[in-house]
Structure formats: structure tokens, C-alpha cells
Image (cartoon, rainbow, N blue to C red):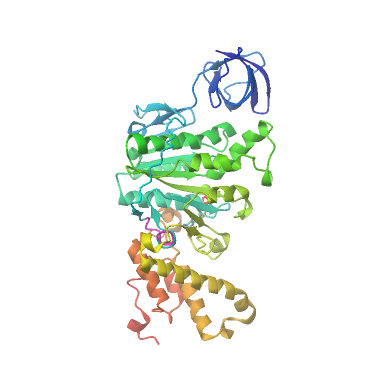
Amino acid sequence: MNGKITKFWSDVVEVEFNKNELPPLNTILTLHNNTTYLLVKRLIDYKTIRAIIIYLSKDISVGEEVINTGKSFMVPVGSESQNNIYNFEGKPLLKDRITNPKYVEMNSTINKTRILDSKIEIIETGIKAIDFFMPIIKGYKLGIFGGAGVGKTVLMKEIIFNVNKNSRSTSNIFIGSGERSREAIELFQELEESDLMKNSSMYISKMNESPGARMSIVPIGITAAEYLRDKEKKDVLLFIDNIYRYVQAENEVSASLGKKPSVGGYQSTLESDVANVQERLFKNKEAGITSFQTVFLPMDDISDPSAVAVFNHLDGNLVLSRAQTAKNIFPAFDPLASSSNSVDPKIIGKRHFDAIIEAKRILKTYKDLEDVILILGFDELDEESKKTVKKALQLENFFSQNFFMTEHFTKEKGSYVKLNDTVESVIRILNEEYINQSPEIFSYIGSNLNLPTDDELGLK
Ligand SMILES: Nc1ncnc2c1ncn2[C@@H]1O[C@H](COP(=O)(O)OP(=O)(O)OP(=O)(O)O)[C@@H](O)[C@H]1O
Ligand SMILES: [Mg+2]
């Protein structure tokens, strides 16, 4: 059953086995007393495979014996796995904590019989821009797109804590794919302080780990999410930071295996790599996986092939833009670039739906007028356009919001705004109830239901 190394280069190892004893794809091979891990990625002929290095505890050499474990990654799953952080090996990183999880093989939980449930349950986030423009529904997949440092991780963390405030019974799974280890530690500490670790588990592969580990951590975490949904019938909130790193790691592995790249230098299997993970995230009759995924945009480019591949699978695409951060608007939400399939009167009601359409129309008109204002000046606009611009600025400021997650450095208290209050606040702005007041009064205010209207102030 065991094999011998015949060749290796970059992070690929060629191993020969006895005739017809080849391990199948995605099997883990080990060396050095179970401390070095390889993953089978290509079958070359009846006795040769190519594996990629997941972790090397020391150098390897030709002729060394390799052990076929006969299994893929083993994933700690179920309620018993909660309250801990795991690496790709499934080893708990908090060793002093007694967690006694059950282990299942990676991807053994894939559920092809997707029994869709049409019951709609809205999940309030308390974040105005999300609740208003892209209401989250149970089973929904939200992508948070943005270039470097525009606030993706901060926004995702705010969602984790706010949603958990509403429902203490959900299970959280966090997948850290190829990001900084400091961020994972901070998140852990914050979850711990808020007493949320007891229903959370974290699966982490950091940016300095091998592409094989970074690529595998996503299906590892999804296996755990599926187990909770299908075996324990529990609702799961799944957070992935960052799904782009998964695509990138798949690409690196594909390149080291000598596969030809396709559009934009990405792997030719880009679409299926993305589909393989996204199609596993849904809700069925008993329980659901609702997911929030950050998507890094190389060069801030929303048309990057990796972003487009992810885009197609999501229910909501939330775009954070650098232009907003430049105006000091956080979250740096770009309402015109973002879209959501929950914007449907049958889901959110006609009043909310009409408000979204009108708000978008106003923001779009303002955007079209921006150049004119720059050249001719605001005063040259006709009265109607002036009103539109003013409402647009009021809306833009209204969607800025102080986060609980940033209290420690902004020194401002975080705010949670109820979905209905957000909708009513926007409707008041659209109805021109504050049209004679400065847009600045809306900056970082929470809801404006307590703000005196023009009428109340006697402004004409
Ligand atoms: N809501 C916010 N309020 C105030 N400042 C913010 C907010 N969101 C982000 N920032 C600022 O932007 C910085 C970067 O945010 P964050 O780490 O979330 O970006 P990112 O998009 O995840 O970056 P990367 O691409 O490097 O992962 C923060 O450290 C903070 O200074
Ligand atoms: Mg980040």
C-alpha cells in the first residue's frame, strides 16, 4: 500500500506505488512519522501519482517511503467541535480546551439532494446599508467585494457580532483562508469576550501556509457547516475571509501541476473550483447555511475573472469602494455597484422595495450630474436637480455608520439600527422632510427618526 518518492519539484512530489494500488485523488499521504503531509492531485499512470505538499516538517528526498492513509483530510465536526480553532490537520489549536469532536472525511458530507424551502426569513444585521439595499435571507450568500484595505474584514466582523445579538442559538463557522494570523487571533478573542466561542468553530489556514493548505481549508470548513445543517439540523452562519485566497491557492496548485492557465492568468478550472464550494451552501427544509464571504479585488477591479466567477453564484454582491473611503464614509458601501436578488416586493414588501428603487434612482442621477457640478457649479443646476443632489448627499451620509468593531480606534459608540427604522428613515429623506437642512446632519447618526423635520423646525 505504501509508495516511494521518485521525483519532486517546486511543491509537487511524484510517488510510485505497486501496480493497481494507486490512492484516489484527494488522499492524504504522510512521511516523517505522520508529520509531513501530501495530497494526491493527479493520477499519471497505473502506478504513479502526483501529490502536492501540504506541510513539510523536514526536507524530503527521492526514494523515501510514503504512507497512504487511505483518507482525505479529517474534519472535526458537530457541536462537540465548537469552542475551538482548528488547522488543516483538524488539530485543535487551543490545546487546554477539552473538545472531543467527531471527525469525518473532508467532502464526505456533500448533499446533492437539495430540498429547497420557499419559506422566507429575513436576518437583520443592524447595518443600515445591508438591511436597506441587500436584505439578508436565511440561506443567502453575500459577497463583500473590495480592493485592499477598504473594510471587508471589519464589515464581516460587524455582521458576525450583530447577527449573533439577535439569535443566540445559531452556530457560527469561521473559515480563515489565506489572511493574516493576527486577524484570526483578534476575532477569536472578541468572540471569546462576547461569550460566542461556545457556539463557534474556526478553521484557519494562514497566508504563509502552503497553497495546498490554503486551498483545502475552505472545503474543510464547509464540510463542518454541512454536518451541522444536515446531521444536527442546525442553522449555520458561515463566514469566509477571504474566498479570493482560495481561488488563488487553487491557481498556484494548478500551475505547479503544470496545467495551462486560462483567462487573466487564472486556472482553466476557475469556474468549477468556485462552483464546487458555492453549490454546497444553501438552506433546506430543516436548516440552512447562510454565508458571508469577503472577495478581494486585485487592483480594485470588479471585472477581475476571479470576482466574476464568484459573483455568479451569490445572492448578493456588496461592493466596497475606495471612492467612499476617500469621502470618509464607512462602511465604504457603493449602492450603485451592489446588487441583491432579495430586492423583490414579494420578499421585502412594496414599501421597502419602492424606497430602494427611488433611492437608487436619486443616487444614479446625482452620479450623472457630478461632472456637470464640477464644471458649472451647483448653483447652475435647475431646482429639481438641486433637490435631487441634496437628497443624494443626505442618503450617502445616512448610510455611514459607527461600528461596534471600530469603537476602540474611532472612539465613537457603535450603533445598531433596526431594519424598519432604516426603511422609515430613508423614506423620510426621499419625501424631502429635511430638504432645507444640511446633508451633514446625517453623518454617522443611526436612525433619523428623532431628528426634527423642516416642518418641525419651521424651515421653509
Ligand atoms: N467601518 C469602519 N469604520 C472606520 N474605519 C474603518 C472601517 N472599516 C475599515 N476601516 C479602516 O480600514 C482599515 C482596513 O479595514 P479592513 O482590514 O477591514 O480592510 P480589508 O478590506 O479587509 O483589507 P484587506 O484587503 O487587507 O484584507 C481598518 O483597519 C480601519 O482603519
Ligand atoms: Mg481583510
| Residue range corresponding to the magenta coloring | 125-131
Residue 228 figure quarter: top left
Residue 237 figure quarter: top left
Residue drawn 40% across and 66% down? 353
Marker count (numbered): 0
Position of residue 54 measured from the top left corner of the image (x, y, whole percent): 57, 28
Q: Is residue 244 above or below residue 220?
A: below
Position of residue 262 measured from the top left corner of the image (x, y, whole percent): 68, 42
The answer to whether residue 54 is left or right of residue 449 is right
Q: Is residue 388 above or below residue 258?
A: below
Position of residue 52 measured from the top left corner of the image (x, y, whole percent): 61, 27
148 or 71, which is in the foreground? 71
Residue drawn 39% across and 64% down? 345
45 or 186, which is in the foreground? 45
In the rendered image, the quadrant that contains the N terminus is top right
Can see residue 447? no
In the rendered image, the quadrant that contains the C terminus is bottom left
The answer to whether residue 300 is left or right of residue 142 is right
99 or 50, which is in the foreground? 50
Q: Is residue 279 above or below residue 101?
A: below
Q: Is residue 179 above or below residue 45?
A: below
In the rendered structure, does residue 140 fall within the stretch colored magenta?
A: no
Residue drawn 57% across and 40% down? 272
Position of residue 397 measured from the top left corner of the image (x, y, whole percent): 46, 68
Residue 352 figure quarter: bottom left
Can see residue 76? yes
50 or 409, which is in the foreground? 50
